[in-house]
Image (cartoon, rainbow, N blue to C red):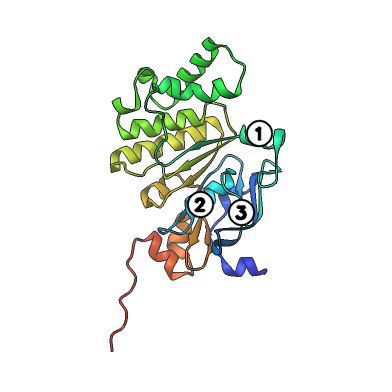
Amino acid sequence: MNAEATQRDAGSDEAGEGREPIIRVRDLAVGYGDTVLLEHVTFDVHRGEVFVILGGSGSGKSTLLKHMIGLNEPVSGSVLIDGDDIVTATGDTRRAILRKIGVMYQSGALFGSMTLGENVQLPLEEYTDLDDDEIELIARMKLSLVGLAQFTGHLPAEISGGMQKRAAIARAMAMDPMILFLDEPSAGLDPITSAELDALITRLARNLGATFVVVTHELPSIFAIADRVIMLDRTRKGIVAEGDPRTLRDTSADPWVRRFFNREAEPAAATA
């Protein structure tokens, strides 16, 4: 058994069996200045799965996602998207990689002065040669996929937070990407709205066949949507568990991992 395997608590990997990896992260180290946040991070994301990155506050979940989509440059390592390294790619190669991914940021990041339809149309106007009628039709179709067909002309301020998240997912899907990255999609939502968003993600993954990479620490969402997870730990600066979240919850050899999935507090320190 290699050193990496001994450092990681692995759950069942049945979700990835027979599936080709569409993302390969190898020996990634990330940090700022002299501060190393994560190191020796290695994992695959399989084509068509819902893959969740989780961990406690400050563990580097969103930071890892930013490196995976090329927003930040790592200290070392590689991130292969469909065979091409986004870390070293430049020019047309990098643009081709970025065309394969769509991103929903934590806040939704919709432009407040633009309607939902205009928000979804924006990447199509920027990166395609389609005419206006085709772009408008595609935007309506994407909004229909997330249940917002009747809200195309609304501004973000005129709809709920959950609907804003749905619209942001529609915009992320505008270019028909192979991979959708969602950063804390349930953040700030009430339990019912969060559950509805989980159901949407599951339905889109099943119907579109796209790969989803989701950052979250919400346990109900993790168990509802995840085929497979990796768990990051701030203290150990890397991946401490990988596999099916239910298997990790029930059988992990790491007490911290079991406490996380079972929502248990740290044991009280012994008193003299």
Residue beneath disc 2: 63
Sequence-first disc among 3 and 2? 2
Q: Residue at x 57, y 51 (%)?
A: 14
Quarter occupied by the N terminus: bottom right
Residue 254 visible, this orientation: yes
The answer to whether the residue labelled 1 contacts the one labelled 3, judged by CB atoms less than 8 Å apart, is no
Q: Quadrant of residue 89?
A: top right
In percent of width and height, residue 253 lies at: 49, 69
State the mark number for residue 74.
Answer: 3
Sequence-first disc among 1 and 2? 2
Residue beneath disc 1: 95
Quarter occupied by the C terminus: bottom left
In percent of width and height, residue 213 lies at: 52, 44
Amino acid type for the residue under numbered disc 2: Thr
> CA gap, disc 3 to disc 2?
10 Å
**In this view, 271 is above or below 48:** below
